[in-house]
Amino acid sequence: MKIHTRIIGFAAAMVMALGAASAPVLAASEIAHDPSRDVQAEGVGNPFNYGERNTPADASTEEIRRINHEMTVQEVKYALYKEIDEHWDLLRVRLGQEDREKVYALFLGVGTRESTLGGNGDGADVETAQGQGFGVSSAHAYGTLQTAVTAFSGCDPTFMPEDNVPEMYQYSLSESTFYDAIISNHMGIRKILHFVEIGINKEGLEGYQVVRGALKGFNTGWCDYTGDNEGYYKNYPDEIIALAHWYYEEGHLYDNEFSWTNDKRVDQYRTGDNNWWAWWGDVKPSMAEVKENIQPSATTTTTTVTTSGENKSKRYGDANLDGNVTIADATAILQYIGNRDKYMLEPDGVLNADVDGNAGITPNDALVIQKVDAGLYKLEDLPLKA
């Protein structure tokens, strides 16, 4: 049994226009979210109630994969959107794309190129390069986006580290995390942003070439621009953006329709000499600072505590003392645990970080803050009762 629930469809008579003005109109019964939502401003609202993971953390690998296997194409799509919405501010700045539905479409393109969005009847349960055993091959990948083991911390130390996306939590490699559909999506998005940073800061890429290069990196490990190999771009990044354009323009962002690599229905979006990206727009990707506060932020809980005879303002969960409680605090806690000399917390930050109801700072405190970010706990619940 899945641990998320389906929201009952709306009346078929209701309709909504999707994407560009020319996009077809869908009956509201074909979509899972409330059609009255302002998707550009609010996202789709997680209608399948996905949590920070899709499966119980203590389930066997076989059970985790079974749950993922049963996902419909529509569920696979909304599982991607849940992660996009949670990290929308970061994605908007890093990709330079203000149109949320175009970003939805981009990741549908990636998922189509890598897994056909579960359209073959396998849901999000798609695995490749596992023949040498779990975690051995750098190409070992799983899920809708085919996220490789290299995206995770704690993988083979000879693999290139992907520690340059501090705004997003980096899960440690285990079968429980690797095979979970939601975590796999989270880490796949993070992996693309890993290459966005390299493309901007080290390769000097600009405009749509930043995303194009990041997709190249996602597939090959290298996001440098190689203009003498346009055939490669045509077969991977450019194919992805053509597939994305099809979902966006044909109105298939929210239904059970899917495409596939080299699908003839997409041919009209594979036109132009390396200009398949024109519809993506004149984007300006940036490495500007982004403080993760993606979902509507809960009101910060403030109480007064006494420490060494002094009154201090305590905000449970605010480990980095920026005045908010976000995923960045979970990251700060994990960095502090891993290397206290390099990643120090202020004394008040240490006090704020201890939220799980047990004395001392542990990874479980970071997990509690992630659950606050995911809406599973409220700030008023902190600190938890032991």
Image (tube, helix red, strand yellow):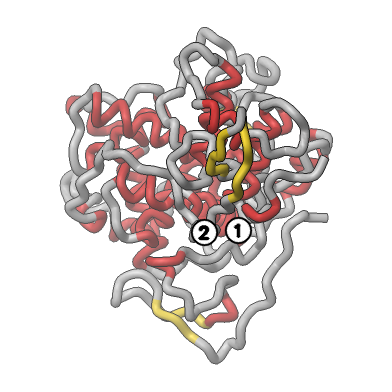
**Going by the image, does 136 lie left or right of 206?**
right
Report which residue position mark 2 lands on: 258
- The crowding category of the residue bearing disc 2, from other C-alpha atoms within 10 Å (few below 14, some 14 to 19, many at least 20), is many
- Of mark 2 and mark 1, the one earlier in the sequence is 1
Q: How many marks?
A: 2
**Residue 187: percent from the left, percent from the top?**
53, 36
Give the spatial CA distance, label 2 vs label 1. Answer: 7 Å
Q: Is residue 269 above or below residue 306?
A: below
Judging depth in this view, the residue of 242 and 35 nearest the camera is 35
Q: Quadrant of residue 65?
A: top right
Q: Is residue 157 above or below residue 141?
A: above
Q: Quadrant of residue 110?
A: top left
Residue farthest top in this picture: 158
Q: Which mark is residue 364?
A: none
What is the quadrant of the N terminus in the image? bottom right
What's the amino acid at mark 2? Phe
Q: Is residue 22 above or below residue 240?
A: below
Report which residue position mark 1 lands on: 73
Q: Residue at x 42, y 73 (%)?
A: 38
What's the amino acid at mark 1? Val
Residue 231 in sight: yes
**Residue 341: percent from the left, percent from the top?**
50, 11
- The crowding category of the residue bearing disc 1, from other C-alpha atoms within 10 Å (few below 14, some 14 to 19, many at least 20), is many
Residue farthest bottom in this picture: 13
Q: Residue at x 18, y 28 (%)?
A: 204
Q: Is residue 346 above or below residue 48?
A: above
